[in-house]
Amino acid sequence: EPEVTQTPSHQVTQMGQEVILRCVPISNHLYFYWYRQILGQKVEFLVSFYNNEISEKSEIFDDQFSVERPDGSNFTLKIRSTKLEDSAMYFCASGREEYEQYFGPGTRLTVT
Amino acid sequence: QKEVEQDPGPLSVPEGAIVSLNCTYSNSAFQYFMWYRQYSRKGPELLMYTYSSGNKEDGRFTAQVDKSSKYISLFIRDSQPSDSATYLCAMGSGTYKYIFGTGTRLKVLA
């Protein structure tokens, strides 16, 4: 059964550094999402992406964040200048229909 | 008032019990309602989704939506120890943005 994959599984970075989190959505899916989950807290919506553009973004998704779908298979989240409070699990999700979201295993980002 | 409220639990039940998990919400524009299961340090797994009001059944799982009360439920019949996980509700209004509840931790005791 096809799955969403994410790399790396764990990323450690220093405050102020740029990070790129990578996702390979399920191949025939059209809707793509990034979420984050700070340890012990709820899953928070960051951004949705459809038809090669951002559909919706949350207040968290400020100018430090960007997303790209550089080719037909990858979907990336870039954080330009990481802060301590960006430490969290970052989940990518994809779906064929708008309400359908299949999540990847996540990337644990630790900012020191 | 939070947009989506969910009792964090933990909820402990004996194996074979019927489990009832609930969420309330405040945004009347929500039309899409989903339930996810999340095991520790894993990604959420989509269990069921419902559009608008009504019931939906899939195996041991039944999802109910009562839009008049702004209340959704997930029932698990014949619960198993492998059902022990955190259950998340999520909702959206058709704008490609979904709000999650905090999750209810469920323990099914053998």
Image (cartoon, coloured by chain):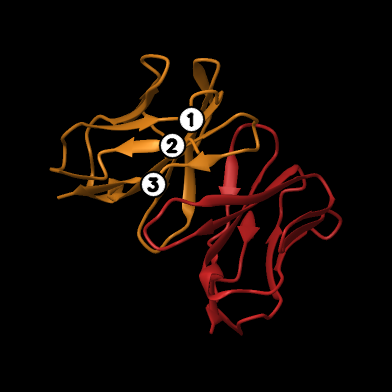
| The label number, if any, that marks residue A26 in the structure image | 1
Q: Are marks 3 and 2 in contact (CB under 8 Å)?
A: yes
Q: Residue at label 3?
A: A105
* Callout 1: SS: loop
| The label number, if any, that marks residue B89 in the structure image | none
Q: Is residue B87 above or below residue B52?
A: below
Q: Are marks 1 and 2 in contact (CB under 8 Å)?
A: yes
Type of residue at label 3? Pro
Judge from the rendering whether residue A3 lies leftward or rightward of residue B100; answer left or right.
left
Q: Position of residue A68 (x, y in %)?
A: 38, 20
Mark before the other along the chain sequence, 1 or 2: 2
At 48% from the left and 48% from the top, the residue drawn is A44
At 56% from the left and 23% from the top, the residue drawn is A30
Type of residue at label 2? Val
- Chain A on-screen colour: orange
* Chain containing mark 3: A
Q: Position of residue A76 (x, y in %)?
A: 35, 27
